Image (spheres, rainbow, N blue to C red):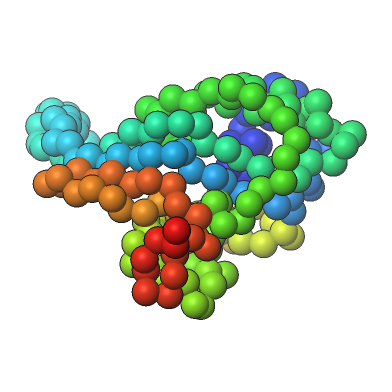
Amino acid sequence: MRLALIRTGIEAFGIEYVQSVLFPHICVMPIHIRPPERVALTSHVLRAYKVEDKTQETNEAPIFREMVHAQGPVTVYLQVPSHLQESFSSILRMIGFWGQASSLAWCTEIGTAAPSTQECVTPLRLFPGHAPLRPFFSSILSEFRNGSVTWKEVMPVIGERKANPLRMDIYVWPLMLTEHHGSGKLFVRTPFGELGSDGATKE
């Protein structure tokens, strides 16, 4: 999400404004992501083409891709300084994809609300020790290494080697597996606190 804010901010306001004004806040602002109500994962076999460097011949091979189908909006909570609300609102309205460029996303609403951490993606290292992990979806995501990441680390100069500004971590999503058909899976958003220690849903 932070990289999307930087990329779109440059498109909207230019690199100097993002570097001097927005970037310090993007590095340290708390970000919480609430997934859609229902998410389906399906596996697809695609036909891929690759051009060999030496021969310039085109080879064809099957590849596997897992596609995501969502029902309901993704809610992103950003803690934005009051004097920069207009700038960040403009950036959020301009973001057209999230993750891969083949995805499609658009902003439907901007408002003021506090996130419920029980319904937001959580790093595994911060996940409550008493809560069961098995019913929930987990994945590896990248995040800024820390709040002291510098602009040159994110926007490196060609030829210079800089420290990696990102770190990989395991995240747990409040998405519980409810159906499994072959390679397809259906997840429903379920707050972490609604499960007991045995994994059963609380009534």
Q: Position of residue 23 (x, y in %)?
A: 75, 43
Residue drawn at point x = 49 percent, y = 26 percent: 105
Taking the image as shown, residue 186 lies to the left or right of residue 188, namely left
Corner quadrant of residue 186 = top left
In this picture, is 51 found above or below 118? above
Front-most of residues 29 and 50? 29
In this picture, is 5 found above or below 171? above
Q: Position of residue 97 (x, y in %)?
A: 49, 28
Quadrant (top left/top right/bottom left/bottom right) for the N terminus: top right
Residue drawn at point x = 45 percent, y = 58 percent: 203
In this picture, is 168 found above or below 16? below
Residue drawn at point x = 38 percent, y = 34 percent: 70
Q: Is residue 180 visible?
A: yes
Corner quadrant of residue 128 = bottom right
Front-most of residues 108 and 5? 108
Corner quadrant of residue 56 = top left
Front-most of residues 131 and 102? 131
Q: Position of residue 19 (x, y in %)?
A: 77, 39
Number of dots carrying numbers: 0
Residue drawn at point x = 61 percent, y = 56 percent: 117
Q: Position of residue 16 (x, y in %)?
A: 79, 32
Q: Residue furthest bottom?
A: 129
Q: Is residue 157 visible?
A: no
Q: Residue furthest right?
A: 83
